Image (cartoon, rainbow, N blue to C red):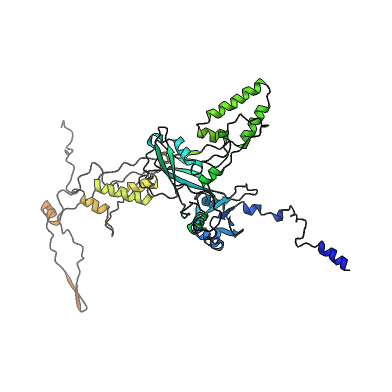
Amino acid sequence: MASQLNKALQFLSIEEEEEPCVLPDRPEFYATERNELSLVGRLLNPKVQRMADLILDIPRKWQLYDRVRGVALSQERFQFIFKYEHDLLAIVKRGPHTFKDWSIVLERWMEKPPEDYLQYLMVWVQMRNIPVNHYTKGTIEYLGEFAGHVEEVAFDPEKAQTKDYVRVWVKFDVSKPLRRAKKLTLPGGEVVNIRYEYERIQKRCYTCQRLTHDQERCPFVRTQKGVGEKSVGSSAESKNAEALEGLDESDPLFGVIPQTHLGMDPISGRSKIAKEVLQGMRQYLLAAEGPEKMAREDRVINSLQALENDPLGQKTFLRLEPAPMVSTDLDKGKGVVFDFSERMDTTQRPEKLMVSAISAGARILQSWKVLSIPTTADEKRTGVPSLVTRILNSGKVISESSSPPEAVGSTQSSFLPEGSTGYSVGFFESSTSWTTIKKPRIRRRPGTFKRKNNGKGIARNQATVWKKIGDSVVSENKRKAHEDVEPSKSSARFKKPLVVPNEGPSNI
């Protein structure tokens, strides 16, 4: 019994070796549809940036509230799931984001992310003090490589530039320090100090210029104070510590590619020649023998020598990096820029019906002239004027041949009654053919004294006959006058035809 127990103790192990669990490949175990509208991020300074505060505050900062929700994946990584894709694209386009004044890295979710996932930050960099004679796109792109991989250049030599800097959009590696300045030696021997400034990057370590810690936790400061910790090397130290990549003697490229084209590029931190290019060179040399192989080796050597002083060519042909885009928008990526020098073209909106009618009436009253109204195509086709034409025609009270305002005061007062607001509106009636009906001429009757002077006579006094009826006395005469006025000589009774009377034949 004791021997069996001893054997069991010998084979006993704290770490149990078990077979890994295999997840079934079924749709209910995938969240691909939900993750397609999500961003995955990483905290660069988790000592200061608390994950719980980030999940609750970022939706409010983005002003999305119930349209995005956060998920804490680990102590440094998180995910934000959006309800609409346009909100996701707007957040990505907004540029580098910060939380607690420290930067965070955001990238769109990928089902199979690469090795350098969440390692780069897209940021706009301002460069100052560029020499005037080298103010070109090539120089700007070359100098931008010191800050990171240049994706876009905001430069337009044909446009006026009011800022003292040029901008490039770079892909910055967050494990490296921010470069504040770089000394540039010109072909003539002059040394110029190019200054760099990163937009929307707030806090950083003032000692090593990194985004992953503050100055109190900087490894260089703690090493100087006597704390025995391994420091993180800067870009200059890492450049000296880099080992050049060598080639075996059995490699067909051995002796063909010079040693200066091997290893890592000190500016970009990437290989000077991409692995795909090296593999293509090997296949190109192995496909020939004898003199043909020697000729091909000479072509490879001449090609590398031609690109030795061409940094843009090395970037395009040797490292297989795409050429940066050139944007003529100098303020691209800045968000809302208030510039009153560029005014928007304001198109005049058509006036409303009543506003146009009122303005036409006001012009008529001021000029005392009739406005000419053009006839539209619909009016010509149907023969009936539109409503606007009828309203505007209502103000045509005074013609161009009319008398001045002093002579037409009565006409205006009769046809343009003034309202309570002090504005007068014209009105008239039109016939079925839409022509203005002329006002009939008013007949004026002469006064009484003038009629008496014309010979109509004086009224005769008639005797009044009184009759007593009961207690009252009334007159028997009617109120109608009997020949009270002598007929005028110009009346119809006195107008007789002036002809010669018939007195018989003329020969009698």
Across and down, in percent, residue 94 comes to: 49, 50
**Residue 486 quadrant:** bottom left
Front-most of residues 162 and 451: 162
Q: Most extreme residue toward the front, as rendered?
A: 226
Q: Is residue 440 left or right of residue 483?
A: right
Residue 62 in view in this figure: no
Q: Is residue 64 left or right of residue 192?
A: right
Q: Quadrant of the N terminus?
A: bottom right
Residue at the location (66% across, 32% down)? 249
Front-most of residues 458 and 21: 21
Front-most of residues 48 and 153: 48
Residue 408 in view in this figure: yes
Front-most of residues 89 and 441: 89
Q: Is residue 465 left or right of residue 166?
A: left
Q: Most extreme residue toward the right, as rendered?
A: 1
Across and down, in percent, residue 241 comes to: 56, 44
* Above-or-below relation of 95 to 374: below
Q: Quadrant of the C terminus?
A: top left
Residue at the location (45% across, 38% down)? 140
Q: Most extreme residue toward the left, as rendered?
A: 453
Residue at the location (22% across, 78% down)? 470
Q: Most extreme residue toward the top, as rendered?
A: 291
Number of numbered markers: 0
Across and down, in percent, residue 14 comes to: 75, 62
**Residue 382 quadrant:** top left
* Above-or-below relation of 385 to 63: above
Across and down, in percent, residue 17 comes to: 77, 58
Residue at the location (54% across, 45% down)? 238
